[in-house]
Amino acid sequence: MDDWPSQTPTPLEAIERIAQSADRVLAIQFFLFFSRFEYALKRLPKISVKDSGVQPDWDGYAKERYTAKGESADRWEKIQRRADFLEAAHYLINEPPKKQVVKDGVLRWKERTKQELKFSMPELLVLVRAVRNNLVHGGKFKDGPIEEASRDEKLLRHSLTILSACLEEDDDLRRWFMNDLY
């Protein structure tokens, strides 16, 4: 890299700057928790097979465990009595993560309207995945939307609360999540 301008950080230095940011520990915790949650879904097994391989079936899990009758309906009723869950759910529904789109050849953020969102576990887990996608693939760059950066901590914390509540209310999922961790 002899022709790399000396005042410009190297790619590794740029990544180091991100790694030292204020919310790095929370972001790392979120990534690890999210990844382990996906591992647990696959081990249940809640998987979908696509051309590109096997993926965790988030939607199938949410519909099976939180929308059906009987035990699943009881689990949904129970989880809704948790104050931490309700706070997180209401935040994600009322202040949902935006979706990154291309409009007129430019990356932009698209608002999700509250009318299109339902208070349900399938919808909440879609929003948690959107938080993850925005963090990994989204527009976290200097000329990106500053107002989104100020919401990152809340979005991450509330997403972790939703995932944690699922683990605490679902013994099978929790067993796989904790498998070989202790």
Image (cartoon, grey):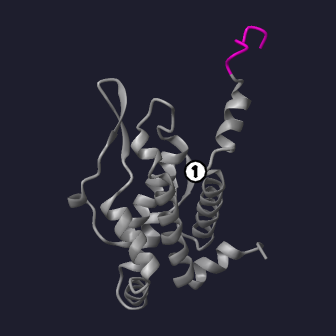
Residue 51 appears in the figure: no
Quadrant containing the N terminus in the rendered view: top right
Quadrant in the picture for residue 62:
bottom left
Secondary structure found at label 1: strand
Looking at this rendering, what residue extends furthest in the left direction? 115
Q: Is residue 134 above or below residue 12?
A: below
- Pinpoint residue 38: horizontal percent, then vertical percent: 59, 63
Tell me the magenta residue range.
1-8
The verdict on residue 5 being magenta is yes
Residue at the top extreme, as displayed: 3
Give amino acid for label 1.
Gly
Image spot of residue 98 (x, y percent): 36, 48
Q: Say above or below: 107 vs 36.
A: above
Residue 81 picture location, percent across and down: 40, 87
The residue that mark 1 highlights is 53
Magenta stretch: helix, strand or loop mostly: loop
Above-or-below relation of 181 to 104: below
Residue 178 appears left or right of 137? right
Residue depicted at 42% across the width and 45% down the height: 148
Q: Residue at x 33, y 64 (%)?
A: 93
In the foreground, 105 or 173 = 105
Q: Is-magenta flag for residue 135?
A: no
Q: Nearer the viewer, residue 138 or 180?
A: 138
